[in-house]
Every structure is written in C-alpha cells, then in structure tokens.
Image (spheres, rainbow, N blue to C red):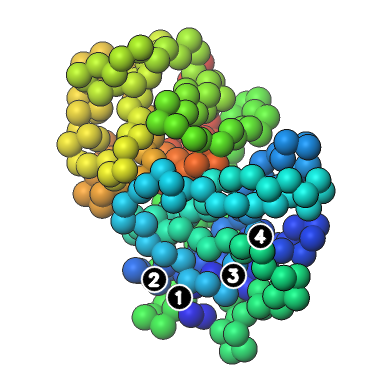
Amino acid sequence: MGEGAGKGAGRSADGWATSAVVRCPVCHKEHAYLATVLPCACGAPLAPPLLTDAPPEPLTRRSWSDEWVAVRCTSCGRQDEWPRPELGCSCGTVLRLAVRPVTAPPDTAASDTAVPGTDAPDATAQGLTGRTAPDAAGPARPPAHIPLPRTAAAPRPAFRPMAIRTAGDVVSTAARYLKWLGFQDIVQPERRPASGIDLHGPGLIATVEATTRPAALRDIECLWLHGMSSAAACVFFSLSGYAQDARDRADELAVPLFALDLTGAPQPVNGPADELVSTGAAPA
C-alpha cells in the first residue's frame, strides 16, 4: 500500500469513509484509524468524511486556523467547522488526515477505493490494538506498547468527548478525563504555577501541554519529581505529542502519557497509560 490512507473500512450513512488503514510516511507503520463521531447541532451523529486516497501529512507545527475543517451534516444540511482528524504514530509523528471537501460531487465517492494492487488489511482485522503490519522494509514489528485487557471491577461508561476550541479547553478536557478515570476533586489553578502542574487532586498531579510543541524530556522528569516529592501519581497530557526521548523516559519512570486532539478524546500512547485506562484510579 502507498504511503497514505488505505481502503475505507467503515462508512457513514451517506457512504463516505469514516475509517481507514493509515501508513505513517516516516516509519511506514500502519494504523487502523476510526474517525471520532460527535453530535451535530441537530443531534445527528456526524464524523468528518475521510479522503482515503490522499496521503496523511506529518504535522510539524500547529496553527489554530488550520485545525478546523468544514463538514456538512447530511441529516439537516448544516455546515460547520469541525476538528481536523489526526492520528499519533508510535514513532512520535502526528499525522493529519485529509477530509473530503463539502463541495465534492457525490460521484467522487468511487475514489475511496484503493488503487488496484495496493489493498490494505481490513481495519477490523487489523484491530485498534497497535499491531503493526508487515511492510516493504521487513517483517511485522512489535507495537510500542500492548494495551491491557480492561480489568476494572466496575466498567465505566464511555467517555464523551467535547470538541477543543481553545487552550483552556485542552486543560478542561484533561480534567474531565481524569474524573472519568475515577480521580476525585480535580482542581485547576486559576493561573498556571511555576511548577507546571495544571491539575491536582488527592494523590494525583497532572501536566497538560496545550502549546504547539511536543512535550520534552525535561517536562516528563519535572512532573515525575513533583510526584515523588508529594507522594502523588502523575499523568501527562499533550496536544502536540511527545519527543522520542520523552516517551522513552516516561516508560522508564512509569508515567502515563496521553495524546489529545481537537475532538477532545484523549488516547493512551504508552504502557502505563494503557494500564491506567484499564484499571482506573486506585480506590482511596
């Protein structure tokens, strides 16, 4: 398969692709991507229609004006701005996926089929567990981390994402997600302290990197040191991903890392984060 989004494995009610197998143009790993569904103002579920024959673009810098894409609801005809789909690769690259323009004629749906001879594995067979498929460079490589089975005693309801439109929304989303994980009495200071601790609660501290730069090694180590000094668990959220040395250090220190995108759905990016999602917050 070429270095782009593969054949759509899922489609919306109007026939547009809502999922695809995406190959990272940097490390050539393949990922199954499923577009996040959010409600339209009319209440109908809506996901950005993917332009699956266009290659994903590595995101090197963010601009708020480029974070949104026009999407038309097929139920009510309303056109609005929606978060542009993104996917974080395990190599640290953030990929931006192309979305079908609202002015595209219906007969262009045929372009959602893959180029002959370049069929990608079905996304449901591929799974969403981080497995990597074989590529031209050699045999299948192990995933960066293996998601653990959900072992929480009481299953939680699904997290309900809310679109992120401001830097403040990034921190608010992280706070909502921590509460969903079971942490209680999450507090956000009115002003960000010099320590960089954006959220705290009983036995917990968290840093939220809402800028356009990936979280660095020093960010991870500072959070961990604050957690050690206060005997608190620590969690890191980042809107622009993580530098590779920061990811490696987080694995060594067992710091859970979560990636955020503008759909407002945090995603675990390392083993400690997967374990936290599986078990939830420890009972007080």
The answer to which of marks 2 and 4 sits earlier in the sequence is 2
The answer to which of marks 1 and 4 sits earlier in the sequence is 1
Image vertical order of residue 118 relative to residue 121, above or below: below
Q: Is residue 32 visible?
A: no
Q: Do the residues labelled 1 and 2 touch (CB within 8 Å)?
A: yes
Quick one: label 2, few (<14), some, or many (20+) residues within 10 Å?
Answer: some
Q: Nearer the viewer, mark 4 or mark 3?
A: 4
Q: What residue is at 48 percent from the left and 80 percent from the top? A: 2
Q: Is residue 205 left or right of residue 246?
A: right
In the rendering, at what x and y percent does residue 230 appear? Answer: 26, 13
Q: Can residue 91 be seen in this view?
A: yes
Numbered tag placed on residue 52 in the rendering:
3
Element carrying mark 1? loop
For disc 2, the marked residue is 25
For disc 1, the marked residue is 3
Amino acid of disc 4: Val
